[in-house]
Amino acid sequence: MNIILLGPPGAGKGTQAKILQERYHIGQIATGDMLRAEVKAGSELGKVAKAIMEAGELVPDDLIITMLRHRLAQPDCQHGFILDGFPRTVPQAEALDAMLASQKQDLRAVILLKVDEDVLVDRIAGRFSCAKCGASYHDVMHPTIKAGICDKCGATEFVHRPDDNPTTVKQRFTAYNNQTAPIVPYYQGKHIYYEVDGMADMNDVTAAIEAALRKAGVAAPSAAAAD
Ligand code: AP5
């Protein structure tokens, strides 16, 4: 099964995608994480993407679509995936449909996490992640269980994303409203579109996503390994 999680910066896409990945045994594809890996590696794509990401703009469609096409061709994607951060423009949504059609696949559900902008600002301001395994936390809403120690891998170093500063965040919201929000009508007409209250407690958001997936005909997690 192939799922898209949509939502503005800080909506909880990455948080929920990681939970669904483990429960449904399908891969998470986060284009933001892929781009950050390219930046860290100093690749040609990373060099182009770095300044764009730091400015809070969107990386050009042709570069992102090429990156995603390579990723979807990997064997682990043949059994289903959760997309987090893609598509972000109507041309990206159209390119995804074409890629899936060429592989005789389709989308099972597109789920929008709805969160008010003032809440998003607080979430992004408090976000930090483990420098070793990338697990994401929040100062107040999702701290580590033991202060200064990653719950997942036990590492003690944490990082803040360079694009989580107030100026860049403002531009990221502008990019979302102008370029990404218009893809909602693209999916609304396809009967695979669901909206979830992303302001709820994390566990309640997961439950609401799973309810949407059941409506979309996706097996409950206990039976999902065979889906
Ligand atoms: P990307 O990395 O995709 O960033 P984003 O979309 O701005 O989303 P975030 O990662 O900020 O938020 P999230 O929704 O994953 O929230 P999270 O779960 O972390 O993209 C970065 C950049 O890369 C873009 O600006 C662009 O330049 C480029 N890019 C990427 N993809 C692209 C594409 N397709 N095309 C062009 N350019 C692209 O949660 C946030 C915080 O809130 C965390 O601290 C978390 O613990 C907390 N939290 C989560 N859920 C809850 C809850 N229910 N209650 C309380 N706290 C919560």
Image (tube, rainbow, N blue to C red):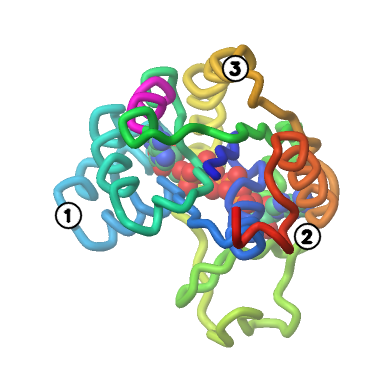
Determine the image quadrant of residue 216: top right
| Magenta residue span | 93-99
Give the residue at mark 3.
190
Whether 97 is drawn above or below 162: the answer is: above
Residue 202: x percent and y percent?
Answer: 78, 54
Name the dominant secondary structure of the magenta segment. Answer: helix
Indicate the quadrant where residue 31 lies.
Answer: top left
Characterize the local packing of mark 2: few (<14), some (14-19) or many (20 or more) Cα atoms within 10 angstroms: few
**How far apart are the alpha carbons under marks 3 and 2?**
35 Å
Q: Mark 2 and 1 residues: CB-CB less than 8 Å, in contact?
A: no
| Label 3 secondary element | loop
Residue 100 vs 91, above or below: the answer is below
Q: Secondary structure under badge 2?
A: loop
- Residue 39 appearing in the image: yes
Residue type, numbered disc 2: Met
Nearer to me, 21 or 16: 21
Asked if marks 3 and 1 touch (Cβ < 8 Å), the reply is: no
Q: Mark 3 or mark 2: which is in front?
A: 3
Residue 34 in picture, x, y percent from top left: 36, 53
| Numbered badge on residue 141 | 2
Asked if residue 157 is among those painted magenta in the image, a careful observer would answer: no
Q: CA distance from mark 2 to mark 1?
A: 35 Å
Residue 161 rendering spot, x and y as whole percentages: 48, 56
x 39%, y 20%: residue: 94
